[in-house]
Image: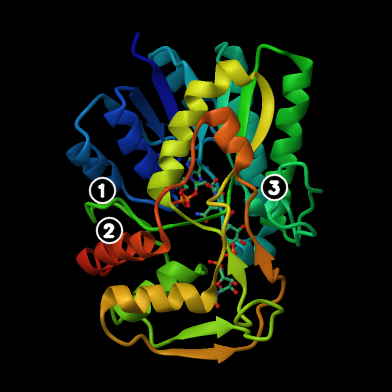
Amino acid sequence: MTQRILVTGGAGYIGSTTCVALLEAGYEIVVVDNLANSSRTSLDRVLELAPGNLSFHEVDIRDADGLNAVFESAPIDAVIHFAGFKAVGESVAIPLAYYDTNVVGTINLLQVMQQNEVRNLVFSSSATVYGDPEQLPIPESAPLSAANPYGRTKLMIEDMLRDIAVSDPSWTIALLRYFNPVGAHPSGRIGEDPSGIPNNLMPFIMQVAVGRRKELVVFGNDYPTRDGTCIRDYIHVMDLAEGHLAALRALAEIGGCTAINLGTGTGSTVFEVFEAARRTVGHDIAMRVGERRPGDASACFADSSLAARLLDWRATRTIDEMCIDAWRWQSMNPNGYS
Ligand code: NAD
Ligand code: WQD
């Protein structure tokens, strides 16, 4: 029987890519998004890439009546919850907005789910919950901590979801801890469209390459790593999307509330990503080394064995494929969706 999945934040970067994968796999989808950090165009393009059954509701997840109306309009089998704010620096500047959207929004969603007897959830968590990791690769059992308000919202939501699953065993919840999602759909039609100055490395490099920014500043080359720059576990957004499908399929079998890393299991340095991007775009990209960015861990990469075991899922795409797809998206859409 066809399953209907409610996707909060489905117009965003990871959400839209996952919507394509869901439609291609034959799911029906109901997207809830208030377009705070996205555009309707992404969903038009999702349907162009994967014609299927997708309905869109411009609703804020903090609006209980609005959400309830969506649940009452069609039976929902499971929820993938992407909606939220995600910029670390901004969360330090406007913490209340982060607690409101991420934490209050999630509480509201969970209450509406409970009222409508929907208890299957895949949640967008983040490797940020590991803080400055002591152990590499990082297993799901590593100590959790948060270095900023954004990270604290993810940690609070994780704690809340663990409590709910203990209180009522009919909940099945996957906490997917993403490492560093990059790249785009290989069509170049949907991808990451950060508003303002990008915080993240890959969109910044691509915006310099396309002429929108002057130069990349590498935040420090005096870390104890192979070339002095920080190591991260970059994961192609297409692999991530497939990880969500794998989690949906495995939810019932796993049961309870389970945290699962979605990463490749290996890390790349900032210089390695930069070199891969330069090879891809085929011309020089302006770059200089600057000061360290406060709060950056020197290395962070996943132990990805639990995902392989529980979800039968592994990331397969290389750093070159990540750069090629990020560049196709950036060069075909130099100003994003606008
Ligand atoms: P995104 O900003 O592109 O997508 C989030 C979507 O949520 C947007 O479409 C936005 O309009 C929507 N939204 C925000 N507030 C809302 C509200 N109150 N009601 C309804 N919709 C709302 O971000 P993304 O990169 O696709 O991230 C998706 C999720 O994954 C987020 O929860 C983020 O914290 C998490 N995550 C992202 C990364 C990353 O590096 N991109 C890493 C780890 C975890
Ligand atoms: C990667 C590396 C920087 C920009 C963040 C969040 C995390 C998660 C993913 C949501 C670092 C360096 C970057 C630049 C640089 N998001 N860099 N110059 O910090 O690993 O993770 O996004 O959950 O919570 O913290 O990713 O892309 O910002 O940085 O040198 O202009 O690139 O120092 O080493 P990060 P990032």
Q: Which label's residue is closer to the chain start, 2 or 1?
A: 1
- What residue type is disc 1 on? Thr
Q: In this view, does 103 lie to the left or right of 73?
A: right
Q: What residue type is labelled 3?
A: Thr
Q: Which mark identifies residue 337?
A: 2
The residue at the point 28 percent across, 76 percent down is 281
**Nearest to N terminus: mark 3 or mark 1:** 1
Q: Residue at x 48, y 75 (%)?
A: 272
Residue 122 in the image, given as x and y percentages of width and height: 55, 31
- Neighbourhood count class around disc 2 (C-alpha, 10 Å): few under 14, some 14–19, many 20 upward: some
Query: Whole-percent x and y of residue 142?
Result: 78, 47
Determine the quadrant in which ligand 2 lies. Answer: bottom right
Q: Decide which of 45, 49 is in the foreground and name it.
A: 49
Q: Where is residue 191 in the image (x, y as percent from the top left)?
A: 33, 55
Q: Mark 1 points at which residue?
A: 41
The residue shown at (59%, 16%) is 253
Question: What sort of colour scheme is used for the picture?
Answer: rainbow
| Disc 3, SS | helix
Query: For the residues marked 3 and 1, what is the alpha-carbon distance in whole angstroms?
Result: 29 Å
Type of amino acid at the residue the image marks with label 2: Tyr
State the quadrant of the N terminus.
top left
Q: Name the residue under label 3.
A: 153
**Circle 2/circle 1 CB separation < 8 Å:** yes
